Image (spheres, grey):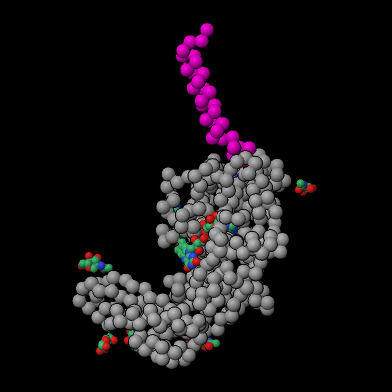
């Protein structure tokens, strides 16, 4: 005879059993699948589940946007940090087989956290170990793996040549994988276009785990992965990049005007002039409300900054002719190598270049 208590207990046990299996079964089978499929026992060292003590630090390692560092943020069941292509292939295969979504993470800078978050059970494929950069100065190309940062790319190029560069964002901790997938603009934009415009080939893994290059993926897919957005088509393992020439020295300036120094008129002129300047000039204006250093009253500061691919002697007559209202002087300009200009624009003037290799998450800037 079944007492009501018994049947209630039975229901509770049953519920507990099912919720338990719901919560753990998919990723347990996923893990089993991964160890079988990868055919590599050392893969367990590259897998982090919530029971691993380093799970949190691995998850946070490139979770730049602190908005997502909260207990309410959905967390991955598993983080895989592959060291070989076969690990990625096995991860894709097993996650599909067990109904788990994957998120690919390179630099982790995604504004919406798309590389670290999903609203369904998911795993992260973190390309932290895929970060080699091979620079071929003679042929002006570089192969760079997706997990490298832009800083690592820039450092490795500068290490071999001061006269080559890659046109992409200034901010050095951005990942190559997500950045180039979405286009990628920086201060060489006017002269050389987007980062994606300078991609010659790619190594890519599709949803079936096939490793493709430009030829085998075809021009349509190759077009799509250069600007169509990361995470949409598959996983880019590495890019073959065309490097662009820069002069041994470039010129950098930053000139300021407040309202009392005709900032309004100069900004107005700038809007007509900037777009017609030669492509060697990158010119920007930042407007900022400040308290006057003279009398403490509110005013507006206009900061005119520029990167010029040439010397001060070339820049001064050009600006005098095109933009005399700015009143640019020799004292306002500094000549330096291109890589130094990147340091200046990163807010790291006079600091060792090795900082470009450092991408410790440090604040909520992103
Ligand atoms: C502070 C800051 C400054 C920025 N400045 C600029 C700028 O000057 N110019 C500019 O163009 N952009 C700029 N961005 C935007 C930045 O380029 C994008 O957020 C870019 O997607 C970041 O790439 P990631 O690899 O760091 O990001 P992730 O978060 O790792 O990836 C971004 C997206 O791409 C996917 N993805 C990552 N790796 C791969 C891969 N290997 N294969 C396929 N998909 C992948 C991810 O799943 C995610 O959807 C800036 C962002 C920040 C936070
Ligand atoms: C698995 O690894 C062993 C030993 O390294 C190798 O002989 C075998 O071919 C591998 N199998 C697959 C399916 O890759
Ligand atoms: C995480 O824990 C599992 C189970 O204890 C273990 O097999 C695995 O090696 C751990 N992962 C890492 C990276 O230490
Ligand atoms: C995220 O939060 C945890 C716990 O509060 C903290 O230990 C960790 O340092 C935070 N991560 C970052 C990147 O701030
Ligand atoms: C630009 O140079 C002029 C004179 O040479 C100087 O008065 C001015 O302070 C400089 N501006 C900046 C922002 O350095
Ligand atoms: C501002 O413009 C006026 C009128 O053109 C001019 O007389 C003055 O010298 C300018 N001031 C500055 C700081 O350029
Ligand atoms: C400007 O002055 C106001 C009033 O004195 C003060 O509240 C404000 O913090 C100041 N702003 C800046 C940027 O210093
Ligand atoms: C580059 O500029 C620096 C600083 O002005 C100067 O010392 C150096 O000689 C310049 N190099 C070249 C190749 O012009
Ligand atoms: C890397 O950045 C972190 C955070 O800003 C800093 O504490 C550390 O000293 C830096 N390391 C190097 C080698 O610059």
Q: Is residue 256 visible?
A: no
In the image, 242 versus 82, the foreground residue is: 242
Name which residue lies at 44% across and 89% down: 318
In the image, 53 versus 208, the foreground residue is: 208
Name which residue lies at 46% across and 12% down: 4
Residue 114 position, x and y percent, is 50, 53
Position of residue 191 relative to residue 126, above or below, is below
Tell me the chief SS of the magenta region: helix
User: Residue 13 lies in magenta, yes or no?
Assistant: yes
Residue 123 position, x and y percent, is 57, 46
Residue 260 position, x and y percent, is 25, 80
Ligand 7: image quarter: bottom left
User: Residue 233 lies in magenta, yes or no?
Assistant: no
Q: Is residue 196 left or right of residue 327?
A: right
Position of residue 98 relative to residue 105, above or below, is above
Span highlighted in magenta in the image: 1-30
Residue 217 position, x and y percent, is 68, 60
Quadrant of the image occupied by residue 106:
bottom right
């Amino acid at each position: 005879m079944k007492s009501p208590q018994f049947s209630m207990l039975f229901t509770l046990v049953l519920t507990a059993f099912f919720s338990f299996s719901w919560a753990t079964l998919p990723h347990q089978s996923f893990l089993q699948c991964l160890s079988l499929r990868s055919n590599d026992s050392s893969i367990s060292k590259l897998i982090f589940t919530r029971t691993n003590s380093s799970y949190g630090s691995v998850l946070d390692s490139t979770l730049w946007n602190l908005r997502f560092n909260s207990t309410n943020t959905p967390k991955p069941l598993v983080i895989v940090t592959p060291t070989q292509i076969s690990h990625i292939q096995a991860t894709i295969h097993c996650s599909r087989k067990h109904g788990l979504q994957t998120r690919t993470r390179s630099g982790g800078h995604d504004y919406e956290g798309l590389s670290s978050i999903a609203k369904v059970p998911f795993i992260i494929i973190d390309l932290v170990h895929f970060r080699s950069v091979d620079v071929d100065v003679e042929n002006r190309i570089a192969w760079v793996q997706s997990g490298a940062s832009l800083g690592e790319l820039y450092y490795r190029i500068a290490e071999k040549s001061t006269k080559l560069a890659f046109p992409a964002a200034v901010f050095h901790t951005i990942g190559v994988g997500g950045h180039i997938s979405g286009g990628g603009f920086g201060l060489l934009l006017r002269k050389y276009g987007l980062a994606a415009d300078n991609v010659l080939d790619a190594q890519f893994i599709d949803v079936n785990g096939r490793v493709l290059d430009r030829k085998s993926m075809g021009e349509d897919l190759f077009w799509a992965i250069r600007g169509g957005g990361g995470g949409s088509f598959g996983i880019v393992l590495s890019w073959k990049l065309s490097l662009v020439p820069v002069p041994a020295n470039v010129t950098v300036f930053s000139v300021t005007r407040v309202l009392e120094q005709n900032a309004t008129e100069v900004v107005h002129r700038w809007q007509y002039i900037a777009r017609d300047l030669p492509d060697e000039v990158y010119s920007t204006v930042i407007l900022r409300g400040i308290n006057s250093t003279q009398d403490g009253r509110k005013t507006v500061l206009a900061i005119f900054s520029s990167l010029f691919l040439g010397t001060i002697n070339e820049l001064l007559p050009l600006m005098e002719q095109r933009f005399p209202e700015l009143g640019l002087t020799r004292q306002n300009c500094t000549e330096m190598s291109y890589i130094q200009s990147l340091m200046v624009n990163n807010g790291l003037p006079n600091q060792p270049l090795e900082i470009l290799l450092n991408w410790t998450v440090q604040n909520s800037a992103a």
